[in-house]
Amino acid sequence: MTTRRALWAVFICSLVCNAWCEPETASKTTSGNPIFPGWYADPEAKVFGQTYWVYPTYSAKYGEQVFFDAFSSPDLVHWTKHANIMSTNTVPWARRAIWAPAMAEKDGRYFLFFGANDIQKDGQVGGLGVAVADAPGGPFTDYLGKPLIDHFHNGAQPIDPFVFHDVDGQYYLIYGGWGHCNICLLSDDFRSLKPMADGTIFKEITPTGYVEGSVMFRRAGKYYFMWSEGGWTGPDYSVAYAMADSPVGPFQRIGKILQQDPAVATGAGHHSVIQFPGKDIYYIVYHRRPLGETDGNHRVTCIDRMEFDERGFIKPVKITFEGVGPAPIP
């Protein structure tokens, strides 16, 4: 009897182990939302080679925002954390409020644009900086030894950079906060800005409702400009967009496409967009606040599909708990 009890106990333990000890990744069929644990916001999503990357803000008090982590995935479902890819230790002029990274690859090097120090007026140290690395997972070090932009031009706070690479090869820097947005031409070496044909360096392209969080992409010959509206600590933070025939506009607001769902999450905003290489398949990567969460810094990074109607307008995004299915790049 003792032997039979022992065998039965082994059998039960085996069932429990199979149910609870199997690695999570073996049965994970969708990304789930959030796509990785931890408080992270303002995600910049990119595709480098056959790998998806997400570069978010570490969502904490300003004095604790002194580094960036990154996350990589082969399929949008399984994510690997790359800790501390950049910090104030390698960017001496940045001391806090390291925000909203933007990424660009050029000539085999990787450039990380970011806001730092949350400056409130001209003359304060901080603004938009650039760091560089030889791999998308860093480590990134200061590229200029100073901010690239450290003044308020056209009323735009120098935060929330986005780098847009147009089909003609030109790289644009789009940025802004406090309800104003500028677009600029980056020099070939990313060390400075260069004037446009009319001599303008900081061209304001602010659409109605703009607050911060600029994003741009090109589809079917049209330029889609997207931004965040509302207050980032509140439930009504959201994303709207416009379309134009040129990256410098003019941009007229079309409507809101990402916002809270009282059954899922609040404060859905500050996003980026991924296109599956070579296909008309798009994803929106964004942050939101879990239901019942009241701490303004408690935000998580999520992903959902973004689709278009027959006229090219963006359909309202349904935010989900499931996220998206696997999409490995061939």
Image (spheres, rainbow, N blue to C red):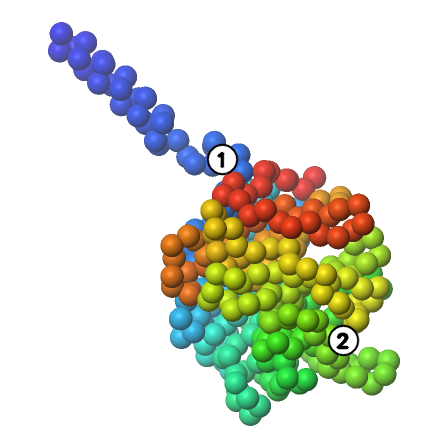
Q: Secondary structure at mark 1?
A: loop
| Quadrant of the rendered image containing residue 39 | bottom left
Please provide percent x and percent y for residue 16: 30, 25
Please provide percent x and percent y for residue 10: 25, 18
Which residue is at the front of the view, 17 or 151?
Answer: 151
Name above or below for residue 265 compared with residue 152: above
User: Is residue 140 among what the camera can see?
Assistant: no
Which residue is at the front of the view, 111 or 62?
Answer: 62
Q: Residue at x 45, y 71 (%)?
A: 66
Residue bearing the label numbered 2 = 185
Q: Residue at x 59, y 66 (%)?
A: 229
Residue bearing the label numbered 1 = 28
Name above or below for residue 89 compared with residue 220: below
Q: Residue at x 83, y 67 (%)?
A: 246
Left or right of 234 in this view: 224: right
The amino acid on which the numbered mark 1 sits, given as a three-letter code, is Lys
Q: Secondary structure at mark 2?
A: strand
| Quadrant of the rendered image containing residue 169 | bottom right
The amino acid on which the numbered mark 2 sits, given as a three-letter code, is Leu
Which residue is at the front of the view, 227 or 165?
Answer: 227
Left or right of 191 in this view: 25: left
Which residue occupies the extreme left position in the image?
2
Q: Residue at x 47, y 32 (%)?
A: 26
Which residue occupies the extreme bottom position in the image?
123
Tags 2 and 1 touching, CB below 8 Å: no
Name above or below for residue 169 compared with residue 313: below
Q: Distance between the Cα atoms at labels 2 and 1? A: 43 Å
Q: How many neighbours does mark 1 have within 10 angstroms: few (below 14), some (14-19), or many (20 or more)? A: few
